[in-house]
Image (tube, coloured by chain):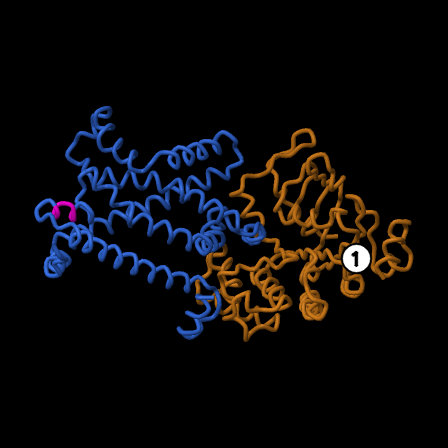
Chain colours: A orange, B blue
């Protein structure tokens, strides 16, 4: 099998005395769509932030296309965070979509999708604008480019946020509970966009409570509990034949 | 003795008063500008994770908010040149002394305003910027700062108007700003009402212009599609 796009090994993360991740191994391969489910506070979102290099792990390593990222060197199990200047470059290949969208309120939808292209990728404004328009069209918002975030619904904001990440042509796209902050009637428009991205072959990791959706689009689902991946398998076998009692309990509660 | 309207008008339209008002305005603009820059640095330092560095900024704010501005100006103009030789040079004019004193004092207040404005920006904003691969400087410039400005605009406008009036303190260190100009004419004519009135008119005009400018800048920071001017005014008024 070819090299994973992202490969995490033995990831440990502590907040104070609280060990949120207790030695997690996680791989994501080119074109794969993986979902992560599990109870709140089990460390799902933390893992995503670590994979996006937005936080530094207290132990373990992350490789992106085979290169060590996020840390400078390993000395007896502990790692030192890479300087922010290097981190900002290493973060570019991985896109992130947040639960609360985190759109830039001072920029229009179009400008939100243009900003990183101009500032980070150094594209010409004209080209950035064209690509931004194309990408907004992909999420069904070609007519909303001039709207500010405050003038968009939650579902529209999240679609702009997806466009903002997609336009950078990431190697992988990470979704942190992308529909949890949405009114129920706005969830499906976001899920549709994610589904079409998956169909186009985007490499995706999705932390979600939308079990039915995970089951539908994911190649593989990981069940997280208390800082560990308890089990990980294709949707069918996870739902039909969970290996752990904890997984069984969780699935009966949410479905 | 009645109010001599002609004398008032001739003072109002005299070149001295216009020049005095100009000095007040230029001093206020420069001092406020320096105070915003220094205050922003102080606010950033205040939010540093290093406790010693952080307390330095806190000490600055404590010191310059505690001492009356008038004393600061007198110390800088009268006391410091006795202690620091280079300040005895020709370049050290009342204008420079006032500029230094007013900016140093105002920076303490601006530091607090900008600190709270920086704190008001949702932490998810910087997170989103970093996730896109922006450097810390790019996040600050392109993401955080515009949102800081929006929050800090109304209180900074307040401070700026205060600054215009604080420039009158510089009359005690012989800067011929607006108040000193009025005082000089009073010394010649002994006409208090007319001269003070002329100065008041200038302050009213300056502050009115500043308020107009501030309102228009605030409209620019509304972050919704442009409404017709009237609707925009109504929205701002609400």
Residue hosting label 1: A220
Q: In this view, does B81 lie above or below A148?
A: above
Bounds of the magenta span? Answer: B181-186
Q: Which residue lies furthest to the left in this view?
A: B188
Helix, strand or loop at label 1? It is strand
| Left or right placement of residue A76 versus residue B95 in this view | right
Q: Is the magenta stretch mostly helix, strand or loop?
A: helix
| Left or right placement of residue B197 versus residue A124 in this view | left
**Where does the image place residue B36, in percent across and percent down from the top left?**
37, 46
Q: Magenta segment: does it hold A117?
A: no
Q: Is residue A189 above or below residue B143?
A: below
Whether residue B96 is visible here, answered yes or no, is yes
Q: Which residue is drawn at 69% across and 47% down?
A: A46
- Label 1 marks a residue whose chain is A
**Where does the image place residue A92, in percent across and percent down from the top left?**
57, 52
Q: Is residue A43 above or below residue A183?
A: above
């Amino acid at each position: 099998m070819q090299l994973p796009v992202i490969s995490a090994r033995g990831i440990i993360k502590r907040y104070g005395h609280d060990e949120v991740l207790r030695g997690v191994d996680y791989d994501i391969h080119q074109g794969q769509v993986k979902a992560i489910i599990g109870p709140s506070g089990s460390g799902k979102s933390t893992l995503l932030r670590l994979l996006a290099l937005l936080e530094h792990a207290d132990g373990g390593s992350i490789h992106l296309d085979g290169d060590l990222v996020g840390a400078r060197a390993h000395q007896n199990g502990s790692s030192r965070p890479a300087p922010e200047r290097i981190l900002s470059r290493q973060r570019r290949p991985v896109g992130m979509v947040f639960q609360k969208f985190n759109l830039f309120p001072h920029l229009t939808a179009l400008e939100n999708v243009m900003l990183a292209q101009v500032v980070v990728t150094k594209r010409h404004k004209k080209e950035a604008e064209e690509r931004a328009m194309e990408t907004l069209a992909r999420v069904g918002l070609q007519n909303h480019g001039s709207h500010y975030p405050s003038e968009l619904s939650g579902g529209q904001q999240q679609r702009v946020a997806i466009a903002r990440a997609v336009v950078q042509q990431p190697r992988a796209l990470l979704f942190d509970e992308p529909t949890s902050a949405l009114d129920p009637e706005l969830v499906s428009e976001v899920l549709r966009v994610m589904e079409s991205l998956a169909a186009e072959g985007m490499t995706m990791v999705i932390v979600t409570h939308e079990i039915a959706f995970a089951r539908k689009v994911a190649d593989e689902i990981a069940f997280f509990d208390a800082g560990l991946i308890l089990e990980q398998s294709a949707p069918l076998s996870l739902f039909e034949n969970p290996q752990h009692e904890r997984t069984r309990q969780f699935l009966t509660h949410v479905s | 003795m009645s109010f001599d309207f002609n004398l008032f008008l001739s003072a109002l339209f005299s070149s001295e008063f216009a020049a005095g008002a100009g000095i007040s305005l230029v001093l206020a603009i420069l001092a406020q500008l320096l105070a915003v820059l220094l205050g922003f640095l102080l606010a950033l330092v205040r939010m540093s994770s290093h406790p010693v560095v952080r307390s330095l900024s806190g000490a600055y704010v404590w010191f310059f908010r505690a001492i009356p501005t008038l004393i600061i100006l007198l110390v800088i103009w009268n006391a410091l040149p006795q202690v620091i030789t280079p300040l005895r040079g020709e370049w050290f004019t009342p204008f420079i002394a006032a500029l230094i004193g007013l900016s140093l004092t105002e920076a303490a207040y601006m530091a607090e305003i900008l600190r709270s404005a920086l704190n008001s920006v949702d932490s998810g904003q910087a997170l989103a910027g970093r996730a896109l691969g922006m450097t810390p400087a790019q996040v600050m410039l392109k993401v955080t700062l515009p949102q800081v400005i929006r929050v800090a605009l109304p209180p900074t406008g307040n401070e700026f108007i205060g600054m215009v009036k604080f420039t009158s303190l510089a009359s005690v260190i012989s800067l011929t700003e607006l108040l000193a100009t009025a005082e000089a004419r009073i010394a010649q004519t002994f006409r208090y009402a007319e001269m003070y009135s002329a100065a008041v008119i200038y302050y009213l005009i300056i502050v009115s212009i500043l308020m107009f400018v501030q309102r228009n800048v605030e409209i620019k920071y509304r972050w919704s599609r442009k409404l017709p001017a009237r609707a925009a005014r109504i929205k701002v008024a609400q």
